[in-house]
Image (tube, helix red, strand yellow):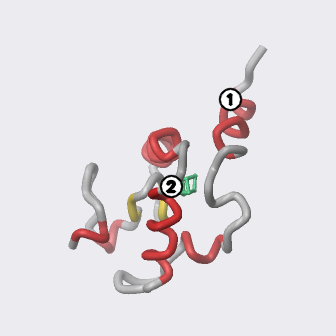
Amino acid sequence: MTSQLDLYVDWRQSAACVNKDPELFWPMWKKDPRKDAALEICQGCVVQSECLAYAEKIQAPGGVWGGKVFAADYGYRKGDNERNR
Ligand code: SF4
């Protein structure tokens, strides 16, 4: 039987960010250059859609998930890409 935890772990094992600096994925302000490095890593990630779906499901309060920047103060909107603003 597959649990919710198993599903979570399965896609995380294929994540391009698994051995990257976690701080890249938690920008502290809108223009924080670390987020650009994180978004670059996301571009080559094979589980980007799973990651984005998970972040939306848990209503991630911040951070970079699935090639998007999640932060209320950053004006994130579904389908929007922080890099393009
Ligand atoms: S999409 Fe980005 S944040 Fe999500 S697992 Fe892949 S590299 Fe990590």
Report the front residue among 81 and 62: 81
Q: Residue at x 47, y 65 (%)?
A: 62
Seen in the image, is 3 located left or right of residue 17?
right
- Real-space Cα separation, disc 2 to disc 1, in angstroms: 25 Å
Indicate yes or no: mark 2 CB to ligand 1 under 8 Å. Answer: yes
Q: Is residue 72 above or below residue 4?
A: below
Q: Is residue 29 above or below residue 2?
A: below
* Picture disc at residue 4: 1
Count of numbered badges drawn on the protein: 2
Which percent across, then down, holds residue 43? 45, 57
Seen in the image, is 76 located left or right of residue 38?
left
User: Residue type at mark 2?
Assistant: Gly
Farthest-out residue, top = 1
Q: Residue at x 63, y 50 (%)?
A: 15
**Ligand number 1: quarter of image:** bottom right
Question: Element under label 2?
Answer: loop
Which percent across, then down, holds residue 83? 30, 71
Report the front residue among 49 and 73: 49
Question: Element under label 1?
Answer: helix
Seen in the image, is 20 located left or right of residue 83?
right
Q: Residues within 10 Å of mark 2 (few under 14, many from 20)?
A: few
User: Residue type at mark 1?
Assistant: Gln
* Picture disc at residue 44: 2
- Residue 63 visible to an observer of this rendering: no
